[in-house]
Structures are given as C-alpha cells and as structure tokens.
Image: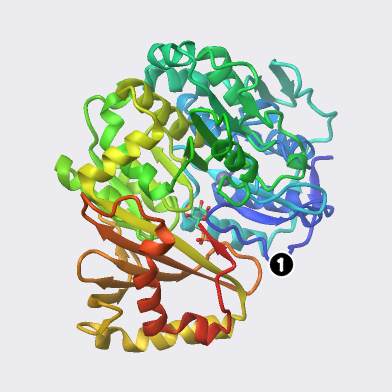
Amino acid sequence: MTIHQTKPFDGQKPGTSGLRKKTPVFMQPNYLENFIQSTFDAIGGVAAKTLVLGGDGRYFGQEAAQTILKMAAANGAARVIVGQGAWLSTPAASNLIRVRKADGGIILSASHNPGGPNEDFGVKYNMANGGPAPESVTEAIYARSQEITEYRKLDAPDVDLAALGTVKLGDTTVEVVDPVADYADLMETLFDFPAIRALFAGGFRMRMDSMCAITGPYAREIFENRLGAAPGTVAHGTPLPDFGGMHPDPNPTWAHELMAEMTGENAPDFGAASDGDGDRNMIVGRGIYVSPSDSLAVIAANAHLAKGYKAGLKGVARSMPTSAAADRVAAKLGIACYETPTGWKFFGNLLDAGRVTVCGEESFGTGSDHVREKDGVWAILMWLNIIAARGQGVAEIVADHFRTYGRNYYSRHDYEALPKDVANAMLDDLRGRLTALKGVSTNGLTIESADEFSYTDPVDGSVSAHQGFRILFEGGSRAVLRLSGTGTEGATLRVYYERYVPGPDGLAEDPQEALAPVIAAAEDLVGIRAKSGRPEPDVIT
Ligand code: G6P
Ligand code: ZN
C-alpha cells in the first residue's frame, strides 16, 4: 500500500530556513510525511524529477532520509541523489543540485541549533538554482499542509545508505554519492590549491573546529588530504547525531575551545570553525578574532588573488546590519554594493542576475556565486588563499586592511527573551520619533538620518518593509535595531553598533571601548536598558 490517510498538523509553516521544530515533533507518526508530501504537492509533484537529498548528520536524519526516499519513489521521482550516510553540508547540497541539474533538493538540518533526541531538527527545500525556496513556495507548502488528507510512501525495505552506488527503489533510481567529492572538486576550481599546499608544507599551522558537525569530512578531505595540513588539524571532525553535546554555532561564545587555543601559548597560525550544516564560519588569527563584517571586507578586497575570482568582482552585497566595511572596498574597486535585509535569501536574485559575486552577513555567513547558500569551508579556503598569496598572517592582513580603508568598529548586543510587548513598545516608540531625530546631538554625536529600513529588490522590484531601524550619525557611525527572526522565546532585540575611524590613529582599540559613545547615544535616544529593565545585554559578539 502506498497511499496513506492523514490529517493536517498545525504549524507546518517553513521559515526562510525551512521547517524547524524539536526533534520529537518531527518524530510523531505522519508529521514528516505530511510535510514532505505537502512540499512535493506544492512544487507540482516530483514525477519524473531528480532530487538531491542529505543533511548535517544530526539525530533522526537517517530515518528521515529513508522516509523521504520511499515517498519520492511513491510519488514517481526519476532519481534521488543522496549523500552517503544521508550526509551533505548545505553548500554541498546546493552545489550538487546545480552540477547535477536536479529539479531541487531536500536538506535535513536545523543549522547551528543543537541536535539530539530533545533538540532541534529541520527540513528545507531548495530550488533548481540551488537556493532556498522563496516565500511563494514556502507559503504554498504551508497552505497544502493545512488541507492534506493523504501521502504516498512506498512499502519497501530501507536503502543501504552506507554503500556508494545506484539501486532501484520501486521505479526510482537512488544514487548514493560521496558527499564530499563534487564539493571538494569545485573548491579546487576556485582556489589556488598548490599555493595553499606550499603554505602548509612550509610549516603553517591551522586549527579547524568542525564542532562534531557536518564539515568534518569536508575539512579532512580538503585541508588534510588535498592540501597537506597536518593530520589532526581538523578537531571534532566526526559528525555525531548530538554534535557531541556541542552547540555548533561558530562564534566566540560557542567555539570557545578554538578561541582559547588561538589566544593561548603556541597558538596555531590560523583558526576557523563552522556550524551544524556548514554554511556559517568564523575566522581567527593568532590572538585575533576577525568579525564577520571585517572578514567580508577583507575577502572583497582580496578575492582577485584566488583563481576563481581573478577577473574581479561584479559587485558585493551585505545585509543591512552588517558593517559598512565592505562598502568602502566596493567604492575603492568601483563596483556596486548592495544593502539587503537580513537573510541569505535576499542575495539570491542579485547572484542569479550576475550583479554580485560575493555576499556576507554579520551573522557569520559569507559566500559567493559558486552556490546559492552561504559557505563556511569556502570562506575558510578564501582566507587561506589570501594568506598564501600575500605571504602575511591574519593579523597583518587585517591591520593592513584597516590602514587602507579605515576601521568600522563593530559589535552586536543581544537582549534575549524579552517580553514581546516590551520589545514592540520600544520599537513603536522609536518609529514614532524617527523623523524628529534628525539633527539631534548626544554624546558628541549628531544624527544625520534615522529611518526604518525598507528594501526594494532591484531585480524583481519586490518590496520588503520593516527590516530594522537605522540611526546614522555624522561621520559614519550608526546604531541599528531589529528583532531577531530566528529567536524561539519571546523577542530577541539585536542592537548593532558601528563607528568609523579613518586612521591612521586609533585603529587598534578594543571595540567595546571604541563604540562606547555610540552605545551611550543609542541608550539616550532609545532607552534600551531603561525600557527593557535589563542592565546589560545577554550576548555580545
Ligand atoms: C539565519 C539566516 C541568515 C540570517 C540569520 C539572522 O541564520 O540563514 O541569513 O542572517 O538567520 O538571524 P536573526 O536571528 O538575526 O534574525
Ligand atoms: Zn547553518
């Protein structure tokens, strides 16, 4: 029997990163099946189509993959290309969709959220361009999930996902592929592997923290096998269903082991980390943490040193809260710089239209037009390529960058789990006073303009309003406020502070100290601490 009766579940509404729920929610009978059938129905069915399937190795991924394979078969798919062990990093899945000209793909991940029987699971559908489904599609999936009455699933034994090769599942061909090979080959076309190999051969030491998540096998193959980094360069390199209890989010808080090593005695030359599904990254030098905004700017300024980018960049894009460091590089290069709302999906049109080559966000995402997702290992390789080409370490490259472009001091302060009404009242109040703020001076800073960010996509003309508040001060400093779109409890207020120092003096201060006047000005103008009743932020990055 392949047709099964079912009833809708509430709340199967995918966000921009797919449907994310606690694992036990996904493990309820019919829950995953309903969502997958709704996805298939919403995209016009999968009959005769080719799909890519894989995930970040978290708990329930294997079982979910088996279910999806049997459903794809019962729905008439021609072929499903699945990563061995149901493994594929998000950027590798995006690449596989593109190189195999698949009709789409399903990624099993909840990104940087912890995994395990009581942690998070997620399912995301990507389109034929390799990028996440747009809102029109996710809306259609949700609508379908609310009226679903049956799903199709083949009654068949599990496919052996440990063995590479091709098998039949009903009339569907299931092709189990090496999750790493195509991706690693793509990286070899973009970066100067011989130069990086020479760097490692010369004694350069790296620490890559894969945080027991999906990049382990990619990092071992690329850094250790293909580039000759010392065995053991990759730490936490075996993906585990619960990520070994780690919180696989590459920032100084969660990647504290790496931070301790990079600031300790005998620190390696270069450190990097990536998240659960491999799309985020963090870059660290010996004793120096590179903020994601600065990393984007350094990459934009130096990408031409990598062979895949030697023709130069078409343009760069950053999310609005990301610092304007990349804008200064774009201005110098004479290329376009786009400011988009938070969320990788806003880069998709710009990449597809060939308007930008490199994109980045303050939330530890960097990438280029090689795939349609952000890409952690790509960013790390780009840094290695820049280090090899310039013959300088991370600290020298960053210091040089600041001397050339000035420094956009930057920090994000998060106030987590605020009561929603408190957060909304604070921002409503600010909204009402925005126009009156122009020309106001406080803490030695004068407001040049204040607005609520609204984005008009230059490719399709669509408008995304209410994307956060910008208070711009004369001289290039600013405070940005927005509510997180990914928080799970109450409202998370993110406040992003930025202060521009042109140099040559004052380029090596502590960011919190350098930003103190901007932080004080924002407090005066918005009353964040006063209104939230929180004396200090919960997280500072
Ligand atoms: C996800 C998206 C990113 C985005 C981030 C913002 O990770 O993939 O593109 O930058 O969410 O999260 P926030 O909590 O600030 O809305
Ligand atoms: Zn991720």
Left or right, residue 323 beside residue 10: left
Q: Name the residue beneath numbered marker 1.
A: 10
Left or right, residue 346 beside residue 58: left
Location of residue 9 in the rendering, given as x and y in whole percent from the top left corner: 74, 63
Q: Is residue 485 above or below residue 354?
A: below
Which three-letter amino acid code belongs to the residue tagged 1? Answer: Asp
Q: Is residue 28 above or below residue 90?
A: below
Q: Nearer the viewer, residue 273 or 313?
A: 273
Left or right, residue 484 beside residue 489: left
Q: Is residue 276 at least partly visible in the picture?
A: yes
Q: Is residue 469 at least partly visible in the picture?
A: no
Q: If the image is split into quadrants, where does the N terminus sit?
A: top right
Q: Please say which color scheme the image uses.
A: rainbow
Q: Residue at x 52, y 55 (%)?
A: 16
Q: Residue at x 49, y 40 (%)?
A: 287
Q: Specify the quadrant of the image occupied by residue 481.
A: bottom left
